[in-house]
Image (spheres, helix red, strand yellow):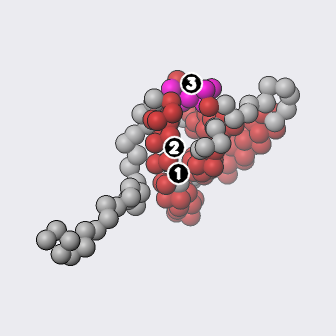
Amino acid sequence: MDTNRLKIIASALTVGLILSSCGPSDPTPNAAQFCAEVADNRAAIVAPTVTSDLDVDEIVALHQRLAALAPLAIAVEWSALTEAVETAATVVPNDGASVQRAVDAAYRSESAAVDVAEWVRASCGVDLGPVTTLVPHDQPEPATPVGADQ
């Protein structure tokens, strides 16, 4: 992706945000609609197919649409995932700094991804997992004090 590509992405995101903030059909947090969208778009969320710049734009738009619908219980977490996707969309493959920004955003969103997957499974009945992370996010089992089993 070159500089023109980045300008196009920025312009498209700006226009999309402006258009989505206008009119009476503003999306508002809606758990039922969020769950329906997640169920309908599970494959695009879990393992998006990217073969063109248009695919990238569609993935970003999907995450932004879901961010507008995300229920308050996971709105912050979904926003973190959306930010990571938006950052990944700006990657210039041979630019180490842009790749590193995307990697950093992915690491920052790990915990959010785990929380979203758990909420979606429990509330929507949709399995987005397993969520692969570099840092363990499960609560460790408490240690048994030495001599407690005697």
- The circle drawn on residue 116 is 2
Quarter of the figure with residue 61: top right
Q: Is residue 28 left or right of residue 93?
A: right
| 141 or 5, nearer to the observer | 141
Residue 35, magenta (yes or no) = yes
Question: Which secondary structure dominates the residues rendered in magenta?
Answer: helix
| 18 or 39, nearer to the observer | 39
Crowding around mark 2 (Cα neighbors within 10 Å: few <14, some 14 to 19, many 20+) is: many
- The circle drawn on residue 112 is 1
Give the residue at mark 3.
36
- The circle drawn on residue 17 is none
Q: How many marks?
A: 3
Q: Is residue 49 left or right of residue 86?
A: left
Image quarter where the C terminus lies is: bottom left
Distance of mark 1 from mark 3, alpha carbons? 20 Å
Image coordinates for residue 91, horizontal then vertical, percent = 57, 52
Tell which residue pokes out farthest to the front in this image: 150
- Decide: marks 2, 1 in contact (CB < 8 A)? yes
Q: Which residues are magenta?
A: 32-39
Residue 92, magenta (yes or no) = no
Q: Residue at x 69, y 43 (%)?
A: 9
Residue type, mark 2 in image: Val
Image coordinates for residue 115, horizontal then vertical, percent = 50, 48
Residue type, mark 3 in image: Ala
